[in-house]
Image (cartoon, rainbow, N blue to C red):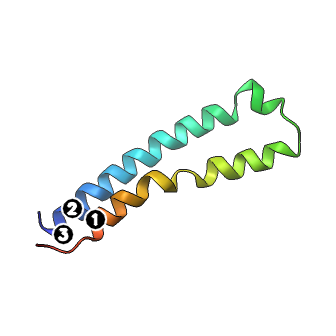
Amino acid sequence: MPIRIRKLIGALFMVVYVIFYALIAMALAQSRPLQEASPWLQPLLYAVLGTIWIVPLLPVVTWMAREDR
């Protein structure tokens, strides 16, 4: 598969993934357990929710950057 097609597919996948992840993270952030959590725990949870989305996308980025055969 040509690199241009891989990058297009990967970019579209990443956009869709980030939209769904943002909706799920927003729902979790507005949930009652997180709202009632300790004020010291909330920033940690928001930091985790804000950075964990990167981990599943690393294989996609690696696949997109792979050289043509």
Mark 1: secondary structure: helix
At label 1, counting other C-alpha atoms closer than 10 Å, the crowd grade (few under 14, some 14-19, many 20 or more) is: some
Could you give the CA–CA distance between mark 2 and mark 3, rounded to whole angstroms?
Answer: 5 Å
Asked if labels 1 and 2 touch by Cβ distance under 8 angstroms, the answer is: yes
Q: Residue at x 70, y 31 (%)?
A: 30
Q: Is 69 on the left or on the right of 46, as rendered?
A: left
Judge left or right: residue 35 versus residue 22.
right
**Which mark, residue 6?**
2
The tag on residue 64 is: 1
Residue type, label 1: Met
Residue 9 screen position, x and y as percent = 24, 55
Q: Residue at x 20, y 75 (%)?
A: 67
User: Relative to residue 8, is residue 20 depicted above or below?
Assistant: above
Q: Which mark is residue 3?
A: 3
Q: Which of the 4 quarters of the picture holds residue 65?
A: bottom left
Mark 3 element type = helix
Marks 1/3 in contact by CB < 8 Å: the verdict is: yes
Tell me the kind of residue under disc 2: Arg
Q: Residue at x 88, y 46 (%)?
A: 40
Quadrant position of residue 41: top right
x and y percentages locating residue 5 in the rendered image: 17, 62
User: Marks 2/1: CA distance?
Assistant: 5 Å
Among the two numbered marks 1 and 3 on one chain, the one whose residue lies closer to the N terminus = 3
Relative vertical location of residue 56 with respect to residue 25 in this rendering, above or below: below
